[in-house]
Each structure stands twice: as C-alpha cells, then as structure tokens.
Amino acid sequence: MSKLWQKDYSLDSLMEEFTVSNDYVLDQQLVIADCLASIAHARGLQHIGILTEEELSNLEKGLQRVIELRQKDDFPITIADEDCHTAIEAFLTKEYGEVGKKIHTGRSRNDQVQTALRVWMREFTLKMCKATGELSEALLAFAQKYEDVPMPGRTHMQIAMPSSVGLWAASFAEELYDEAQHLMHLSWMLDQSPLGSAASYGVPIPLDRQFTSEQMGFTRVQNNVLYANNSRGKFEAMLLDGCDYIALTLSKLAQDLILFTLPEFGYFSLPKELCTGSSIMPQKKNPDGLELARSRSSVVSASAQRVKSIIRSLPSGYNRDFQDTKEPLLTGTKASWQLVQIFKRMLSGLQVNEEALIAGCTPELYATDVVLKQVMEGKNFRDTYKEVGLHLNAVSKLDPIKTIQERTSIGTTGNLGLDEDQLFISLLISGCNEVLASYAKAYKELCGIEDVETVLY
Ligand code: ARG
C-alpha cells in the first residue's frame, strides 16, 4: 500500500524501517478506537454537508466491517502501510471507491491518532480503576475474614508492635483505593475530544467539534487545537504515573508475601498452582509470580519515565517523536493491568496460618504495651520505658487477640473501619460501571455492534 502522503517518490527502505519501526504492529491495539473515531468524523463531515447520506452510510458500513475483522484478529497492517490509519483508509477506498478518499477531509493523522489514543486511554483508565477497586475490595474481604488474627507488626523489619492480618490487608486495600480514585480523576482529564484539531492548528472548514465529541461519548471538546496536539505524551505519562503508584503498592505487597510465605516465617502460604518449581531441586516451591510482580512494577515506572523523556524537549505542535510514546504506553499499561489481575488470583488462593502468626508474636512484641499499661496506672512514660528496656527478659507475652482488640482509636487493629472502606470502594466501582456503560452506549450508536471494547486484552 502506498503511504497517505506518497506523491512522486518512494521512501528509502532503510528510512521506512526506521520511521515505521514497530508502530504498525502496535497499531493493532488502536484499530477499533480509530474506526469509532472515524465514524464520528464521517458523521461530522455529513453534518456540515461535505459527505452525502449515502457516502456516510458506505463509510459507516466499511468501518463497521473493519471493527468486525479486527475483533476476529483478521485486519492486517503491514510495514508498507505505516500505521492503522493508512490501512483503514486503504480498505475503505478498495471496498467503497471514491468515498474512501474523502474521509480524511479536515483531519490529519496527528489528530486522528490522538483521538484513537484518547478513546483507548479513557477506556483503559476506567477499566484499570475498576480492576484496582475490585482488588481493593478483595483485600478488604480478606481483612474482614482475618480481622482478629494477630500478626507481628514490624518496623525496620524487626519485631515492633502487635498488629493483625486485618490491619495488614486493609492497609493495602485503602492504598489501592486512593490510587484507583486517582485514576478516576485522570479519566475526567482524558474525557475530552481532540478530534478536529487536525495537524495542530485546526482547518478552514467549519468542523463541528462539539458534534463529533458527543458522537464518541466525550463530555467535552479539548478546546485549544494546539494544546490538543501538545497533550500527546503528557496524558500518557500521567496515566502511566497513575498506574505506577498501583504497581508500587503491589510491589510492596509482593515483597511482604515473598517474606511471609518463606518457611522460616510461614505466616501465609500460596497454593502450589500459583508457584513454580526448580529444574534441579525437587523440593522447590518458588514464588516466581511474586518476584516478577516486583520486577514488572519497574516496567511500569520505566514506561512513565520513557514517555516523559521523549516529550521533554519537544517544541509545540506535532513531532514524530510522539510515535515513540506509543510503545511505553501500551507496555506499561498492560504490565499494570496484568499485575492487578495476578494479585486478584493470588489473594483468592492465599492461606493464612494462624498458628505461625501467633507463634511469631514473641514477648518482645509486647514491650511497649507493658510500658503503656504502667503509664495508664500513673507512672511517667520515660522512666517506665527505661525500666522495661533494661529488663526485657521480664516482659512476657500478652494475650495476642486481646491486645489487638484493645487498640480502639480510628484505624487501629480494634477499629479498622472496614465498613466505611467498603462503602467508598463500592461507590467507586459503580462509578466506573456507569461511565463504562456510557462509552459502550456511544460505541453501539456509532457502529451498531453490541459490547465493543477498544482495549483488546
Ligand atoms: N504513527 C504516527 C504517530 O503515531 C501517526 C501520525 C503521523 N503523522 C505525521 N505527521 N507523520 O504519531
């Protein structure tokens, strides 16, 4: 296929390989989003009298077919096509003739790819928000189930203060809730249509940007056409940063689990289906999934960093460098998605070994409690602290369950506030469902196909 910009010469093959790189492969992920945005654009052209009803109907049929082909994994894009935009226009021209040559009226591939990415990213963000909310919910249910199971609390990894499995699990639930909430805010930022900004400066035809934005189910138009193009990469980086916070949390959870599932600790164990073996040591049951979760979180961080490095010194307007933000976007988002999924699985198989946890609550864990009991009886803290510290051998183990129930300030082991956490998480999840349903409705109205998804995992 000749390039959209091809006139009277062919691109040097080495330059083609260099400029296209793997963009034509990555673009498979954008085909459906691009078709939906193209239908909105075609409707916009008909709306202002540039296309006839019949031309629009042919374009809609063609774009619907591309969506169906892509859903069957049967819409090839070759290196000679450069990208999905070219492959789609070529398909329309081949199948429907002249009208295929009209669809690009008033748009550039710059706002075309920006719009496809925006559609894709807003859907991913909501799905990731929902999945993170669900993981948070699962951790909360776990916390509820083991609310009163004692667990040694550690600082500097050393035995510190009485804690519980409930406190430990709910801490991750609340952290993930905040991070999912952050994605919800980002989804609002992403919910603006860049379509109609063209190459970066708009066009001298009266495109109705509000109309096309509504067709795609965006709540608003991204107003300034230059900003609409300049925000490429920036929005990707913000999304990847949002995912990175989740990945950081899961990396900590992975590390805790690697430690606490060690036979030396034995607080928790993972079913063998979630562990791998060794090719030489028959006894091994390795937590490879947790280790890779730890390393994959760095993939998410690095992806965010890569995008920021690419856009750092770019001048205003489209620059081809933007193309190279696509790979980190797709790699980083997928890694974070997989992380959340794998932890949902892990959590459902995680066993709690109450005996080992109680045995881990050694007398030293109660040293501060012993001091504070005496303080409550009237002694001053500093002298009692010294006294107890100088006679640690005299500290004996207190009742592990009683000590965690005795802590009653907000957020402590005896007052975890799980019901309130649950309420906030369910509100967040239903918010995601509502917005995702509005996208699905917009997609259905655009292409007539039920349950279209642009994020294809
Ligand atoms: N594949 C390109 C990208 O992702 C499409 C836009 C090309 N635009 C251009 N002016 N060369 O950025």
Image (cartoon, grey):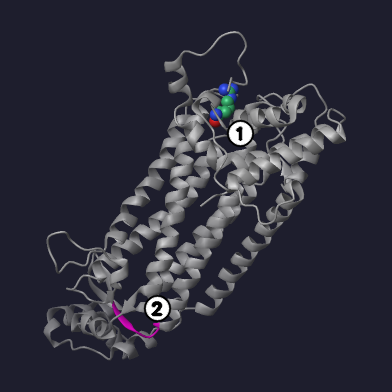
In the image, residue 393 sits, relative to residue 296, either above or below, namely below
Along the horizontal axis of the image, is 120 left or right of 136?
A: right
In the image, residue 244 sits, relative to residue 416, either above or below, namely above
Tell us which disc is closer to us: 2 or 1. 1
Amino acid on which the number 1 mark rests in the picture: Val
Task: Look at the image and give the residue range highlighted in magenta.
Answer: 146-152
Residue named by callout 2: 166
Question: Residue 44 location in percent, x, y?
Answer: 80, 35
Residue at the image position 56 percent from the left and 49 percent from the top? 455
Can you see residue 336? yes
Q: Residue furthest top?
A: 8
Q: Give the position of the N terminus as an image quadrant.
A: top right
- Distance between mark 2 and mark 1 Cα atoms: 46 Å
Along the horizontal axis of the image, is 287 left or right of 423?
A: left
Q: Callout 2: 10 Å neighbours few (<14), some, many (20+)?
A: many
Q: Circle 1 — which element? A: helix
Q: Is residue 193 magenta?
A: no
Along the horizontal axis of the image, is 250 left or right of 421?
A: left
Can you see residue 316? no
Q: Residue furthest front?
A: 95
Question: Residue 422 location in percent, x, y?
Answer: 54, 75
Residue named by callout 1: 113
Residue at the image position 85 percent from the left and 35 percent from the top? 54
Question: In the rendering, which numbered label is found on residue 351?
Answer: none
